[in-house]
Image (cartoon, helix red, strand yellow):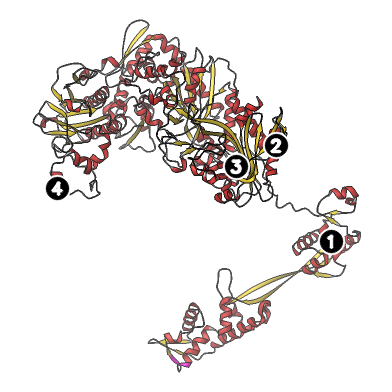
Amino acid sequence: MPHVTFPLADLRALSGIKDLTLERLDELALLVKGELKLRASTEEEVKVELQDTNRPDTWCVEGIARQLRQHRAGEPEAYPCFAEGPAAGAIEVDPSVEGERPYVAGFLARDYTVDDAGLKAFITAQEVLCQNFGRKRKAVAIGIYDASQIEFPVRYQAVPRDGHAFRPLPPTDAEPRDGAGQPIPASRWEQPWTPAEILADHPTGREFAPALHGELAPLLTDARGEVLSFPPVINSASLGRVKPGMRELFVEVTGTTLDQVLLAANVLAANLADRGATIERVETRYPYDTPRGRQVGCPHPLADRRSVEVPLGEFGRLLGEPELARGDVERWLRAFGVAVEGEGSSLRVTSPAYRLDYLHPVDAIEDFAISRGYDAFSPCLPEAFTVGGLAPETDFSDRAREIWISCGFEEAIGNLLTSASELREKLLLPDEASPSPAPLLHGGPLVRIQNVMNANYEVVRDWVLPTLLEVERRSSSAPYPHRVFEAGEVSVWDPAANLKSRGEQRLAALICDAELASFTDMQAIVDEFLRRHGLSYGREASPGTYTLVLRDHPSFIPGRAAWVHVGDEELGVFGELHPELLDRWGLYLPVAACELRLDALERALG
Amino acid sequence: MTTLSPNEAALLRAIEPGQTLELGELAAASGLREAQAQSAAESLTAHGYFSREEQVTSRLLLSPEGLEQATHGVAELLIRKNVQDAGGRAPIKVAQTVSVLDKAAVGSAFGGLKKAGLLVAERGEVSIKDDPAWAVHEGREALLRAVAAAGEAGLPLEQVPAAQQADLEERLGGKRKKGLFLQEDTRLRSYTLSASGAARRAELGEARPQAARLTADMLKDGSWREVEFRALNVANPPLTPCGRRNPYRAYLDLVKRKLLSLGFEEMTGSVVEPEYWNTDALFLPQFHPAREIHDVYFVRDAASGGDCFAEEIEGGVEPVASEHEGHGASGSRGWNYDFDRQRTKRLVLRSQGTVLSARWLRKLKLPGKHFAMARCFRYDEVDATHAPDFFQVEGIVCSETTSFRHLLGLLRLFAQEVARADEVKFVPAYFPFTEPSVEVHMKHPRLGWIELGGAGIFRPEVTHPHGITAPVIAWGLGLDRMAMVALGIDDIRHLFTNNLPDGLASLRRASAAR
């Protein structure tokens, strides 16, 4: 989530709340869904985390101040710059950018002398917007220039990467290094670079190379051919260096979605207007169709995406206050900076042009609730009567847990993610490529993560016994005997299933002891467990019995494993674990173990 | 009259009136081990049946350094010999060359001699001063040899000549002090029968056979009447591993019971989900930065090694796709982009419990209250605050009249019932699938204000595709932190037994501490 940092003095000046303290800001930040990091903040450096990923206008000190200001004044502020009007300049788009980075918008900011605080805030806003909203400049990138040096119209084109060299802004690193790790000599910054050289050797170029889409390099140049920038990567050193004291700025936004580009430009225009700048429109002329035609002005009113019609009754219905008066709703909405029109029982609510988050009437309803304050709504309990209950498989599993605990077993709970070797090699099972020797218990392949972050957590377990062995591996300091079990879920790879896997409830247990960990010791418990479900051992399958089939499983000593069957269901296996397996886990006492399929048992019982 | 333990009785029987026996003799006579005999004798002394005398004898032994000097000679005398051999005057280096002894010992002896004025140093050479004080070093050499000759038994302290007493004290080693000599004290206790002891002894009958425990044979043949049961030792309770619930599971059970008692019905589902349910149905646009807060694990196709896709989405994706594109049943403007229908089938590991709530909307009957304890997975580095997978407790509440105020009431109820907190505050929040959205913070008695959970009313874009137009409250509680506090754990990984540092030993400690 976006974080912004700013001096409290800047917020005081912008919001007009002269005596604003950090404590007071902690409460007021709720208006922008901001969480003040109180402990990490000082007056010089206030840190706020903004929660609303759909409101990029709040990710800057100007936006926070604006929300506070309007709430205090009780009405929305007017931004004349968002009205349609004549353009003070133009950007000519070349057909070559259509496949690369098709949209660009820009505006001019005059009558404002760039100061330190404003420049810092602009750069913070730019970075946060590009990072979060612009997805690391892929979707949106922003440039700012000294407008007095630019001759309009500006031209936006895509050029071959090995042509059109210009001098880029040097990076801020103290000792910049090129792609090969060699220091870049200071003299290099006096020479022109081709886009390809920038991408290969300029630190900023290397960082943002992934934000490029096509084979070419988008380029903004002015009417004289002077380069403004190579978006979304870097500005030129000649026009793209902004310093305090400058009096005319040109701001441009490029990207892949027109409305995102326009919204980012609108947010920046509102910010500069808040600092006293006069915003002048710049028109972009496209040689191809865009969702908003071939001539698109900026700042843009975006009028078609800002209004919702909300019946007055909807406020009351959703918020639980059927008596809500229109006047109250209107008052609090206006204090949130949105316009309200219409008569009687329907409200037309319109967000300002720096917000595009009104998708549905509920969005305006939340604005009203936040503006009025959540504390103003008195909590009440749902009246409707409902019957509580567990899912059948949870109920069954919980009862199984009680039985094993009553038989003296200590309960474990394990993670589902683990490594493949813990489930296969260390259990003496063939690797994933081979067919499973016990396909009902564990698949050949595993439910495997595509984007693994850590090889210890690369697959979902498809049986529980390995989890218990991990517990046992760590337990040598606990007095014996060890009797451990877990009733838990697994996910077995199953290409025939819709989700390529089936989730199952399992119960695995083990006994580890010098004397008490034989096949018979485990058989006694498994038998007790099944008896408590009304099943007793029988030589032949019949109602009310379970049968045992002696069949080897690679994890168990040959001849020392038995499979449990009830009716048509194979419940699982138990027996004495193979010494080779114990050796792989570093266990030096015999272990008897079982793995049972609880779902299968539940089905078998009908 | 005091009841005597079998050991006490055995001691009483072993000593004749008028006899004085040392502890070892008592043990031998009674057939007890010395420790048993001592504890019984002390107890008899406390009863007044025995009177006790104690004699302390002290003996001298040699430390390793002492043994060295007893064998090769005293350092001071060896230095003197070096000087004498060189004709009464020798360079310091020569004087100090005593290869048979430890260098440090020689160095300190040399320093001592100089300080005492027995050696006179001049221009890098030393000479010997003839002085009666040399006698004490000679006396020490004799004493060292005497102690060495006494061997392991040591030399009784009283045999040390008076002239050596002061020097001995200086050279006696102790716990923190090095020295040539060591002193060992032995306490010798001897016991005599008192008058009342003699009387008590007379009352004791013949000794009966001892038994450790009642056996089946004793019951069968009646021999239990003849035996005396051996005294108990209660000092070391034996450890018996018992069945026990897992503490974390028990905590989750507690929450589960609470929710059942509040009328919630459980939802369950697979940990492998298509993106359709994991994100699309929750109205997270396929492009939006909101997607970043739900970084997910994608499932790999075993056959191709690439992304893994579900065969089909039950019910079809159109109702949800149209909401994203802005022409759905809810009337929403949508997210203004081309919705990728193929991507809906891509399989992921469930990244949030709300997925189950979204799935349940298809089957929801009004009024309904549902909860799930869902295992979830996030693309995060595993550390003390991130487990590889974790539980989320989530759910939905819906009736025709459900509202935001009910949502607040429900959250307050959870704080009271599940977390036992009375003080709560509600904070506006953002979740892509709810509007309005709220976070509930509660005042924890120890931790102060902490976040208990997030909630909201499902956006119409989430509910309308499934035919639900009534407001649906969606809530989620972050219980990990509270479970950690309740269980006294500061590493989230330790909630899971396979990560406990000492496995069962840690588990037993944890459940004992509760």
The residue that label 3 is drawn on is A553
In the image, which is nearer the foreground, mark 3 or mark 1? 3
In the image, which is nearer the foreground, mark 3 or mark 2? 3
Q: Residues within 10 Å of mark 1 (few under 14, many from 20)?
A: many
Bounds of the magenta span? B85-89
Q: Is residue B485 above or below residue B199?
A: above
Q: Which mark is residue A416?
A: none
Q: Are marks 3 and 1 in contact (CB under 8 Å)?
A: no
SS label for mark 4 = helix
- Name the image quarter holding residue B310: top left
Tell me, yes or no, whether the highlighted magenta stretch contains residue B88: yes
Q: Is residue A252 left or right of residue B265?
A: left
The residue that label 4 is drawn on is A187
Q: Amino acid at mark 1?
A: Ala
Q: Amino acid at mark 4?
A: Ser
Q: Is residue A144 left or right of residue B342?
A: left
Residue found at x 67% / y 72%: B185
Q: Is residue B118 above or below residue B383?
A: below
Q: Residues within 10 Å of mark 4 (few under 14, many from 20)?
A: few
Q: Which mark is residue A527?
A: 2
- Tell me the CA gap for discs 1 and 2: 51 Å
Q: Residues within 10 Å of mark 2 (few under 14, many from 20)?
A: some
How many marks are shown on the rendered structure?
4
Q: Quadrant of the C terminus of chain B?
A: top right
Q: Amino acid at mark 2?
A: Asp
Q: Percent position (x, y) of residue A459?
A: 47, 38
Label 2 is found on which chain of the structure? A
Label 1 is found on which chain of the structure? B
